[in-house]
Image: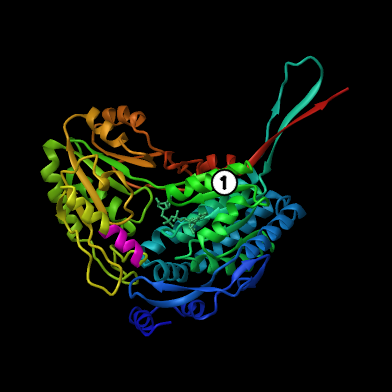
């Protein structure tokens, strides 16, 4: 660990538990054993608030993936987990949630130090969301069942359906909500009796490895959950082609999702793709403008804009546009830019130098295309991969900053005159992950909701997410759902059973 990172951890005083975890040599978790990668290769992990070396993680190989899939397959076929009494699966998932709760503070610290995010937001959102997800799906374990039918066919039959776990699930997650996104995929998979192989993002694998220690402590049988760290181009790509994986659940960018999806279809793998977004926000003239401006800022700058459903395009009624921008800027000024471990931090550094460069390149492109910088627009002098929260005014929909996913603290805004125009502007995107409407006229809101081509519509708020509601995109934001009862359908096969009776 570099001296600058040690100094940073000392300044903010992290827990002994997090210190223990960060000081040990990291290994992958396969078949209940802690192992190095088969070729011994490691990658450096950089701490984003200091740009210093934090630790190393093993870079898995295709051979490591083979071992993990074999362990998951053997476990699945044994029935130890897949045929375990549902109440026992529920008990173990609740126990896992209890352990995450007990270690929540440490997990939030690890997430903040690894990814750069605000430790307070990590605790409140990432870790609490992880606990809630396991508890919600623990409850489902005992409620999964088929139905009996009454066929009209001549003869005498007992006809019923069985819901069966799809098998071994390959899970690929991105770096913005590492533990929580993994939990979104694990909860339903485990409740249904599937076994899993997880590949965390190479930038942020640490919380998954700490989580694997809790999996062991909870008494979840070996081979149910396997974690292979490594590169997307190696381990991730091999997961998409692996004959031993029955279902692939991918969260990440749209271009990679399309590649992964095409490959997975060669083997007719079951597939969930949770991809990118460029979510639109409509602020009607009858909204509470101050409250809307604050909610819009929170909805785009949370996690420094590295949120798939961030409300990144705001269309505001022309009659309130100037007032809205004023409130928005005044509120944005109050958001504290600080290292992730600062308890007051709202705007944290971006995850990497590469992400910082990408965001700054988009800001430059926006300026070149003639968008007005109403606030921010610069990098903040380091150390740390900081970018100022940035607000563009009077944007056109054909600008790159309006059409492409930036994945940083950048909001584009433009005025509109009529609801129809707002809907047209909002839907003018390849993406369709989420949308938001701010208005006090519920009748108008209700008429707009069906017209928005987005998987989630938030009204007078942004990113109100709970495990009881499905999450997933329209259009190039992917297909399939995470969370909610709907997710179970993507982890279960339905078998139709016909018994001819005498
Ligand atoms: P990414 O697509 O680069 O990587 C995502 C994951 O895929 C990582 O684990 C990576 O290692 C792996 N990967 C990379 N190349 C691969 C390949 N060829 N084959 C298989 N796996 C491969 O995305 P990212 O930069 O890590 O994350 C940001 C993106 O994720 C954004 O587009 C964001 O919108 C999206 N995202 C979507 C959701 C959602 O629920 N829809 C949630 C979070 C993030």
Q: Nearer the viewer, residue 104 or 6?
A: 6
- Mark 1 vs ligand 1: CB under 8 Å? yes
The answer to whether residue 458 is above or below residue 367 is above
Give how far across and how far down residue 3 sits, in percent: 37, 85
Give how far across and how far down residue 239 sits, in percent: 59, 54
Q: Quadrant of the C terminus?
A: top right
Give how far across and how far down residue 51 sits, in percent: 35, 74
The answer to whether residue 112 is above or below residue 475 is below
Q: Residue at x 46, y 57 (%)?
A: 174
Q: Which residue is mark 1?
A: 263
Q: Relative to residue 61, is residue 422 drawn left or right?
A: left
Q: Relative to residue 214, is residue 418 drawn left or right?
A: left
Q: Nearer the viewer, residue 430 or 32?
A: 430
Find the residue positioned furthest to the right.
502
- Judged from the image, the secondary structure of the residue bearing numbered disc 1 is helix
As for residue 302 lying within the magenta part, the answer is no
Q: Is residue 138 visible?
A: no
Q: Nearer the viewer, residue 204 or 342?
A: 204
Query: From which residue to which does the magenta span run?
Result: 353-360
Q: Relative to residue 6, is residue 75 drawn left or right?
A: right
Give how far across and how far down residue 487 sits, in percent: 54, 43
Q: Is residue 152 visible?
A: yes
Q: How is the image coloured?
A: rainbow
Quadrant hosting residue 379: bottom left
Quadrant hosting residue 435: top left
The answer to whether residue 6 is above or below residue 167 is below
Find the residue positioned furthest to the bottom.
3
Q: Residue at x 31, y 59 (%)?
A: 358
Q: Residue at x 31, y 27 (%)?
A: 447
How many tags in the picture? 1
Find the residue positioned furthest to the top.
154
Q: Magenta: predominant secondary structure element?
A: helix
């Amino acid at each position: 660990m570099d001296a600058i990172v040690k100094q940073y951890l000392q300044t903010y005083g992290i827990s002994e538990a997090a210190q223990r975890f960060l000081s040990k040599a990291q290994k992958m978790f396969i078949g209940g054993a802690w192992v190095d990668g088969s070729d011994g290769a490691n990658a450096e992990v950089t701490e984003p608030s200091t740009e210093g070396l934090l630790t190393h993680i093993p870079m898995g190989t295709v051979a490591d993936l083979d071992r993990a899939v074999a362990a998951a397959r053997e476990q699945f076929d044994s029935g130890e987990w897949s045929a375990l009494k549902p109440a026992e699966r529920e008990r173990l998932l609740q126990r896992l949630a209890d352990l995450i709760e007990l270690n929540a503070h440490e997990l939030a610290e690890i997430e903040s130090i690894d990814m750069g995010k605000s430790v307070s937001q990590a605790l409140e959102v990432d870790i609490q969301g992880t606990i809630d997800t396991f508890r919600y799906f623990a409850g489902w374990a005992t409620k999964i069942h088929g139905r009996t039918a009454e066929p009209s066919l001549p003869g005498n039959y007992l006809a019923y359906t069985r819901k069966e776990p799809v098998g071994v699930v390959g899970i690929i997650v991105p770096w913005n909500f590492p533990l929580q996104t993994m939990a979104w995929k694990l909860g339903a998979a485990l409740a249904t009796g599937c076994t899993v192989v997880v590949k965390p993002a190479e930038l942020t694998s640490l919380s998954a490895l700490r989580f694997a220690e809790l999996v062991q402590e909870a008494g979840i049988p070996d081979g149910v959950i396997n974690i292979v760290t490594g590169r997307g181009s190696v381990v991730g790509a091999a997961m998409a082609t692996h004959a031993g994986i029955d279902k692939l659940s991918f969260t990440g960018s749209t271009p990679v999702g399309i590649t992964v999806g095409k490959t997975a279809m060669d083997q007719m793998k079951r597939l969930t793709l949770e991809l990118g977004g460029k979510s639109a926000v409509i602020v009607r003239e009858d909204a509470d403008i101050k409250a809307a401006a604050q909610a819009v800022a929170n909805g785009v700058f949370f996690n420094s804009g590295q949120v798939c459903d961030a409300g990144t395009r705001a269309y505001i009624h022309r009659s309130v546009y100037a007032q809205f921008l004023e409130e928005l800027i005044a509120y944005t000024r109050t958001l504290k830019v600080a290292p992730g471990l600062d308890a007051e931090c709202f705007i944290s550094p971006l995850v990497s130098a590469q992400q910082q460069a990408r965001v700054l390149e988009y800001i430059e492109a926006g300026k070149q295309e003639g968008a007005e910088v109403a606030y921010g627009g610069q990098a903040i002098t380091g150390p740390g991969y900081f970018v100022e929260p940035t607000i563009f005014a009077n944007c056109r929909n054909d600008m790159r900053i309006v059409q492409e996913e930036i994945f940083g603290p950048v909001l584009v805004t433009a005025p509109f005159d009529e609801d129809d125009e707002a809907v047209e502007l909002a839907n003018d995107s390849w993406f369709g992950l989420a949308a938001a409407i701010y208005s006090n006229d519920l009748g108008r809101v209700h008429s707009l909701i069906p017209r928005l081509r987005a998987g989630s519509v938030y009204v007078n708020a942004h990113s109100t997410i709970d495990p009881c509601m499905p999450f997933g995109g329209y259009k190039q934001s992917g297909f399939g759902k995470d969370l909610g009862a709907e997710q179970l359908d993507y982890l279960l096969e339905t078998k139709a059973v016909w018994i001819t009776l005498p």
